[in-house]
Image (cartoon, rainbow, N blue to C red):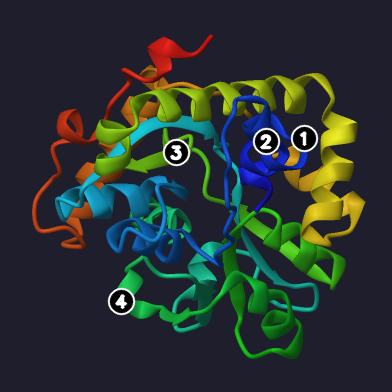
Amino acid sequence: RVVDAVSIIAVQKGFFAAEGLTVRPQRFSSGPACSETLYTAAADVGTMGDTTAVIAAARNAPIRIVASHGGGEHRHRMIVAGTSTITSVRQLEGKRIAVKKGTSTYGGLLAYLDANGIDSAGISVVDMRPSDMPEALAAGSVDAIVASEPTPSLAETKGGRELATLGGLGNTYPILLVMSRGFCESRPDDAARFLNAMARAVAFVNEEPDLAARLLAQATGLPLEVVGKAMGYHTYGLGLGTDVAVSLKKTCEFLTAQGITDAEPDLGRALDASLLARVT
């Protein structure tokens, strides 16, 4: 995903190697799939959206949320076919909407519907991988798709039309860097070096956006114009500031109210900013 530009660039530019780290990158189609690798100890570090991380924390997973490395209030968008007669989100009632369940997009969609007084029970949610969404929309298999960038921009190249973004809810939808508790505790120096490499990548993306877009296009196989447009919906930075904490708190409260999590997770236990203090 384009929101993962920082981690992709860190690999592409050799920033991890420059910190003396040997990193084996793995790619997954969604945050939940990435989260599962931390559960099973198949990975030491993962990136995922706020909803996935909050659900993991609520289940007392052995993880530490150590930083956000990107986000964007409008990075999740709702797309309909260009020929669709749907012009308002209220017209989605009774329609088939594709979204990947368990992701930050899914959590954002539920919050958006709730904020607009739309009963999610009246919508047929189709659990679908983002990579399959543009074709499904073009084929008429679903009435709308909801996904994070670059899927919406890719769907627009196939005739899709934006219906709404999931912005305006006071959530920046941070993408989070999550480490296994065992990795943080047994290899703190390596964990700190990992964050140093990510910080170098953040600087590169912000200082060389055109070159970063070209590298992302090469790494993902996406058209350069799609990558450039999708990056415009994001901000890239390394931190755990107030905006991240507020967004996560909102997500925690909403997921608990919706019954997706049994109890509101203890964010104080899951968040760990100590490694950020060691970034040079």
User: Would residue 7 be found to the left or right of residue 275 on screen?
Assistant: right
Between circles 4 and 3, the one closer to the viewer is 3
Which mark is drawn over residue 177?
3
Disc nearer the start of the sequence (4/2): 2
How many angstroms separate mark 3 from mark 1 (CA)? Answer: 19 Å
For the point 46% across and 21% down, the residue is: 239
Q: Give residue 247's quadrant in the image.
A: top left
Q: Is residue 169 above or below residue 198?
A: below
Pointers 1 and 2 in contact (C-beta within 8 Å): yes
Pointers 4 and 1 in contact (C-beta within 8 Å): no
Q: SS for tag 4?
A: helix
Between circles 3 and 1, the one closer to the viewer is 1
Q: Give residue 272's quadrant in the image.
A: top left
Disc nearer the start of the sequence (4/1): 1
Give, as a three-letter code, the residue at label 1.
Lys
Percent position of residue 62, x then y? 21, 48
How many angstroms separate mark 4 from mark 2 (CA)? Answer: 42 Å
Pointers 3 and 1 in contact (C-beta within 8 Å): no
Give, as a three-letter code, the residue at label 3.
Leu
Give, as a three-letter code, the residue at label 4.
Ala
User: Would residue 272 be found to the left or right of residue 199 on screen?
Assistant: left
User: Would residue 43 be found to the left or right of residue 129 on screen?
Assistant: left
According to the picture, the residue beneath numbered tag 1 turns out to be: 13
Packing grade of label 4 (10 A; few <14, some 14-19, many >=20) is few
How many angstroms separate mark 3 from mark 2 (CA)? Answer: 13 Å
For the point 9% across and 51% down, the residue is: 263
According to the picture, the residue beneath numbered tag 4 turns out to be: 121
Packing grade of label 2 (10 A; few <14, some 14-19, many >=20) is many
Between circles 3 and 2, the one closer to the viewer is 2
Q: SS for tag 2?
A: helix
Which mark is drawn over residue 10?
2
